[in-house]
């Protein structure tokens, strides 16, 4: 099968899955159900301070509050990633033939991400927390990536964000001690992201193979490795906004430093990304100077 035929066959499969298995958060989620004041919003062992002296000093109520704000922070950053991915996907297909399954699937994915961002936004509203934003430098880098990313950067950056969120949400949806709203939002997102991850993995492998065939492509791969490593750094460093610590009465600067020193949190980050890290390593995208960025991101 030629590369084009294979791409089209994959797109046809993904379009069929999308048609048969999509949610409408407006009707599939009971937005009026009250939150349970006792229940955690994420498993305790996934919270960034778990196991530290700061954690030991928190009351049970403060721990629930911290979980509420950490999940709100991850959802806020999720919206930011999804908006960036939508921009990159639209740029990726702008000059391609809209009659192809490849383009039609990309548009379907933009539609999914649009619903996801609204769903996350309503969840944050229901939590009654702020919508946390990435630091100004990360936002500037995001704008740069959104305006310039080629195929390799687009699909590698998408995979890093999607797979990290996917690992955390798979665990949350299966944990019946958590807030039902968090579990339902996680379940919808996991189901719909499975096809995004498939699409990004297949397309990334094709894009890398095509880049290796020419000198210009190999030069741009070297640049892409650095951009992808920097994107990994942005993802792990933006997930938990320091405001989440301030919300439970902790000093945000000291708590953020404690989280980054916390072996349990570093292990959570490494674990959440282990599949995507291994995949990008197989494709030769975690090599050379970029490796330092991956280590600084706590993913290697
Ligand atoms: Fe999504
Ligand atoms: Fe996605």
Image (tube, rainbow, N blue to C red):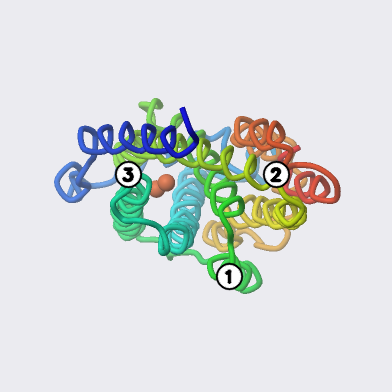
Question: Which is closer to the viewer, label 3 or label 1?
Answer: 3
**Local secondary structure at mark 1:** helix
Q: Left or right? Give the position of 78 relative to 212.
A: left
Q: In this view, does 291 lie to the left or right of 11?
A: right
Report the front residue among 38 and 30: 30
Toward the left, the furthest residue is 27
Residue 63 at x, y percent in the picture: 52, 44
Q: Residue 139 carries which label?
A: 1
Nearest-to-viewer mark from 2 and 3: 2
> Which residue is more in the foreground, 164 or 43?
164
The answer to whether marks 2 and 3 mark residues whose Cβ atoms lie closer than 8 Å is no
Q: Which of marks 1 and 2 is in front?
A: 2
* 201 over 224 or under it: above or below: above
**Quick one: label 1 or label 2, which is nearer the N terminus?**
1
**Who's the residue at 60% across and 30% down the image?**
275
- Quadrant (top left/top right/bottom left/bottom right) for the C terminus: top right
List the residue tagged with mark 3: 101
Q: Can residue 127 be seen in this view?
A: no
Residue 213 — which label?
A: 2
Give left or right: position of 169 versus 145. left
Mark found first going from the N terminus, 3 or 1: 3
Residue in the foreground of this view, choosing between 215 and 286 = 215
Seen in the picture, residue 9 relative to 294 is either above or below; the reply is above
Q: How far apart are marks 3 and 1 (CA)?
A: 32 Å
Give the percent coordinates (x, y) of residue 84.
48, 62
């Amino acid at each position: 099968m030629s590369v084009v035929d294979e791409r089209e066959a994959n797109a046809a499969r993904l379009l069929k899955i999308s048609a048969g298995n999509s949610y409408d958060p407006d009707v599939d989620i009971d937005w009026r159900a009250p939150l349970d004041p006792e229940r955690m919003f994420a498993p305790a062992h996934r919270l960034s301070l778990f196991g530290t002296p700061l954690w030991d000093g928190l009351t049970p109520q403060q721990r629930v509050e911290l979980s509420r704000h950490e999940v709100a922070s991850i959802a806020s950053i999720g919206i930011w990633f999804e908006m960036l991915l939508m921009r990159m996907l639209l740029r990726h297909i702008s000059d391609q033939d809209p009659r192809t399954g490849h383009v039609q699937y990309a548009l379907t994915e933009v539609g999914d991400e649009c619903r996801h961002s609204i769903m996350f936004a309503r969840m944050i509203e229901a939590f009654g927390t702020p919508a946390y934003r990435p630091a100004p430098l990360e936002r500037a880098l995001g704008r740069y990536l959104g305006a310039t990313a080629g195929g390799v950067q687009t699909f590698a950056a998408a995979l890093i964000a999607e797979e990290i969120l996917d690992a955390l949400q798979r665990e949350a949806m299966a944990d019946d001690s958590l807030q039902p709203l968090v579990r339902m939002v996680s379940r919808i997102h996991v189901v719909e992201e499975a096809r995004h991850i498939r699409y990004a993995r297949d397309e990334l492998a094709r894009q890398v193979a095509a880049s290796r065939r020419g000198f210009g492509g190999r030069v741009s791969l070297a640049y892409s490795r650095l951009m992808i490593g920097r994107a990994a750094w942005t993802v792990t460093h933006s997930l938990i906004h320091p405001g989440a610590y301030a919300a439970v009465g902790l000093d945000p600067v000291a708590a953020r430093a404690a989280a980054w020193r916390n072996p349990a949190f570093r292990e959570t980050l490494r674990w959440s990304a282990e599949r995507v890290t291994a995949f990008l390593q197989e494709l030769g995208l975690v090599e050379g100077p970029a490796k330092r960025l991956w280590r600084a991101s706590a993913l290697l």
